Amino acid sequence: MSRKKGLSVEEKRNRMMEFFYEKKDFFQLKELEKQCQKEKGITSMSVKEILTSLVDDGMLDTDKIGTCVYFWAFPSKASQNRKRKIDDLSQKIEESKKKQKSVTEMVAKAKVGREENEERSEVLSMLRKREDEKKQLLAELERYKECDPEVLEEMKQETKIAKEAANRWTDNVFSIKSWIKQKFAFEESVIDKQFGIPETFDYLD
């Protein structure tokens, strides 16, 4: 008989936030350990760890009154925090797009009548780094999108734009590979190996 799979950290975080939003009240640690296990299936031993992570992320408020420590969270503040976080991430994506545009211009200059050199390799390395940064930002945006239905449609549009940008960069890489093949008669496998381009490199669906 297979053992029942436990909740992941993210699932515990989401369930605990649901608990606070539903109760709209103040709780001490001992109360949370009992009620979250009973109502949300979060083991009492992991409640303190989850509380700490949510407080560190600014999703929960906490304060000490006398000798008692209380925790609370209300939907209105959570929505404001997520909106602020989304705005910050959107700004980072915009900055990433600007950096990518600069790299595109550098790639275009490197293609004009030049033989293979270190500068071109550095440009392609920068390109891959920017793509990785963008994927990480999009992944974090996806996480916040799931927490706030109010910005769901906005985040879908951001994801679409980022996806189109990524595919344009894929076009650029393919164009460079084509130019190298025509200019130097290299095999595609040789080019991929030289620039560290994986076999799975392709457009995003």
Image (cartoon, helix red, strand yellow):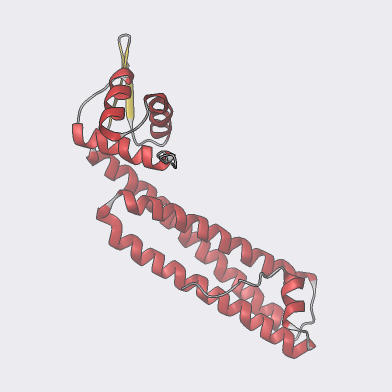
Q: Position of residue 205 (x, y in %)?
A: 46, 73
Q: Nearer the viewer, residue 47 or 146?
A: 47
Q: Image height check: is 97 above or below 182?
A: above
Left of 120 or right of it: where is 98? left
Kindly identify the residue that appears in the image at 62 percent across and 65 percent down: 128
Q: Quadrant of the N terminus?
A: top left
Q: Specify the farthest residue to the top.
A: 67
Residue 31 is drawn in which quadrant? top left
Q: Position of residue 95 (x, y in %)?
A: 50, 60
Left of 125 or right of it: where is 1? left
Q: Image height check: is 165 above or below 63?
A: below
Kindly identify the residue that appears in the image at 56 percent across and 74 percent down: 169
Q: Position of residue 2 (x, y in %)?
A: 44, 42
Q: Image height check: is 9 above or below 173?
A: above
Image mark count: 0
Q: Position of residue 37 (x, y in %)?
A: 31, 28
Left of 101 or right of it: where is 159? left
Q: Specify the farthest residue to the front.
A: 1
